[in-house]
């Protein structure tokens, strides 16, 4: 390792670089993710823990590649797609991203409504107020301030760690299940396994990981530090998922209680473990939904503006970047409004987002691997043979699992 690189890898430098990778990974533990992990633990106990180390590896591959592309090129993912693959393919990708991210943002507001309802706050009050707070954070005019706020919110994920220790699991059994693959001959198990993997990597996370690095003006010299950030962020995010499954697997699975969402899990824990478990689970749900709802509109708007060459950035005013701020405002308003309107089928919206994400993610990963392997774009920092194999293996695995998920959905499982 070069002397300059060694000097940069000090504790202070690592802590200073932390943010983009950690934020991108933790934002993936949103309302849908928590619901999936809770359901996995409640339905199959520790039976899905073994998939989490694999999920961490897949997340590291994708996040590191995106961050490295940002460091080398100084450009976001949308800009590189347009330059390498043309305006038409870029426009199609952005249209799909807008639809999918809006649908996912709606699910985050639904998660906020469910979580705050556990504290006695009706959605007609909670959703408009939280939407206003999210809009104010997004319009704060400072990327670093926004990042600090969101990283502070991420600390609430520690509630799931506390909840896991409160329930007192058999740690020996937990450790064995984590390193021992287990398959159950059940369409429901396969479907839940696919959902557990699918909730780890979303299309918007690629844009977020790369754009955050670009917004911080990190260049090639920062690649070692960004690798520390992306690896640690991916591991922490998957560890949170691990603690959620341990909690519900230790309490709800032995009691035969199945849940369909995170709010159900929080309520089901109370009579068995006590009210503190419900408070911790509900607080985690609210924080996770808030974090993702803050991130998604900005990521969506930033990608679209970059793809079409419009001004973007949290530090740009309305006069400088009207489209950027307008898209953020529209996504927040539409999402909040749909959640509080009576008769809206939120489940159908979330399922539609899942379908779009399932189709879009492998395509974007193909874009990413071609960009990261291009000598003209990446120079000496292009993907090596091992990293290309890992990336293509990730693409194939996600594609196969997505097809399996769609087939199971068509069959009614």
Image (cartoon, rainbow, N blue to C red):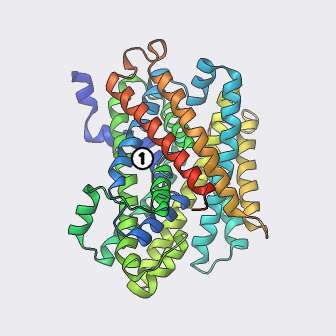
The answer to whether 389 appears left or right of 144 in the picture is left
**At x 46% / y 57%, what residue is drawn?**
190
Name which quarter of the figure residue 373 lies in.
top left
Observer able to see residue 312? no
Residue 97: % across, % down: 65, 40
Q: Nearer the viewer, residue 310 or 83?
A: 83
Q: Nearer the viewer, residue 190 or 135?
A: 190
SS at badge 1 = helix
**At x 54% / y 36%, what residue is drawn?**
362
Q: Nearer the viewer, residue 275 or 49?
A: 49
Give the total number of marks visible in the rendering: 1
The N terminus - image quarter:
top left
- Outermost residue toward the right in this view: 342
Observer able to see residue 1? yes
Label 1 crowding class (10 Å Cα cut-off): few <14, some 14-19, many 20+?
many
- Outermost residue toward the top in this view: 376
Residue that label 1 marks? 22
Residue 371 drawn above or below residue 181 = above
**At x 35% / y 28%, what residue is drawn?**
387
Residue 154: % across, % down: 45, 57
Residue 389: % across, % down: 37, 28
**At x 55% / y 45%, what residue is drawn?**
403
The C terminus - image quarter:
bottom right
């Amino acid at each position: 390792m070069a002397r300059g690189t060694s000097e940069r890898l000090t504790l202070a430098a690592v802590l200073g670089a932390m943010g983009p990778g950690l934020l991108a990974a933790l934002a993936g533990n949103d309302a849908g993710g928590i619901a999936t992990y809770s359901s996995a633990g409640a339905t199959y106990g520790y039976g899905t823990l073994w998939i989490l180390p694999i999920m961490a590896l897949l997340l590291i591959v994708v996040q590191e590649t995106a961050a490295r592309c940002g460091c080398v090129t100084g450009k976001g993912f949308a800009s590189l797609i347009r330059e390498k693959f043309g305006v038409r393919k870029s426009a199609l990708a952005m249209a799909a991203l807008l639809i999918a991210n809006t649908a996912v943002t709606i699910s985050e507001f639904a998660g906020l409504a469910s979580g705050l309802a556990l504290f006695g706050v009706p959605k007609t009050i909670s959703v408009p107020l939280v939407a206003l707070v999210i809009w104010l954070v997004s319009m704060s005019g400072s990327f670093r301030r926004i990042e600090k706020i969101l990283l502070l919110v991420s600390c609430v994920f520690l509630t799931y760690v506390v909840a896991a220790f409160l329930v007192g699991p058999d740690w020996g059994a937990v450790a064995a299940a984590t390193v021992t693959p287990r398959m159950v001959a059940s369409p429901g198990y396969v479907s839940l396994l696919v959902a557990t993997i699918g909730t780890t990597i979303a299309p918007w996370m690629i844009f977020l990981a790369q754009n955050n690095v670009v917004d911080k003006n990190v260049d090639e010299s920062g690649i070692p530090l960004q690798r520390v950030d992306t690896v640690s962020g991916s591991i922490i995010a998957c560890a949170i998922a691990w603690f959620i499954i341990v909690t519900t697997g230790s309490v709800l699975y032995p009691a035969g209680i199945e849940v369909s969402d995170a709010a159900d899990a929080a309520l089901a824990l109370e009579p068995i473990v006590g009210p503190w478990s419900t408070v911790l689970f509900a607080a985690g749900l609210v924080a996770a939904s808030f974090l993702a709802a803050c991130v998604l509109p900005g990521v969506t708007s930033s990608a679209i503006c970059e793809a079409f060459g419009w001004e973007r950035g949290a530090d740009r005013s309305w006069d400088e970047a009207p489209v950027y701020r307008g898209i953020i405002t529209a996504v927040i308003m539409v999402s909040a409004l749909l959640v509080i309107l009576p008769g809206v089928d939120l489940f159908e919206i979330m399922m539609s987002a899942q379908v779009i994400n399932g189709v879009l993610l492998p395509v974007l990963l193909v874009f990413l691997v071609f960009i990261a392997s291009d000598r003209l774009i990446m120079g000496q920092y292009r993907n090596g043979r091992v990293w290309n194999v890992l990336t293509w293996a990730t693409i194939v695995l996600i594609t196969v699992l997505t097809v399996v998920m769609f087939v199971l959905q068509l069959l009614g499982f």
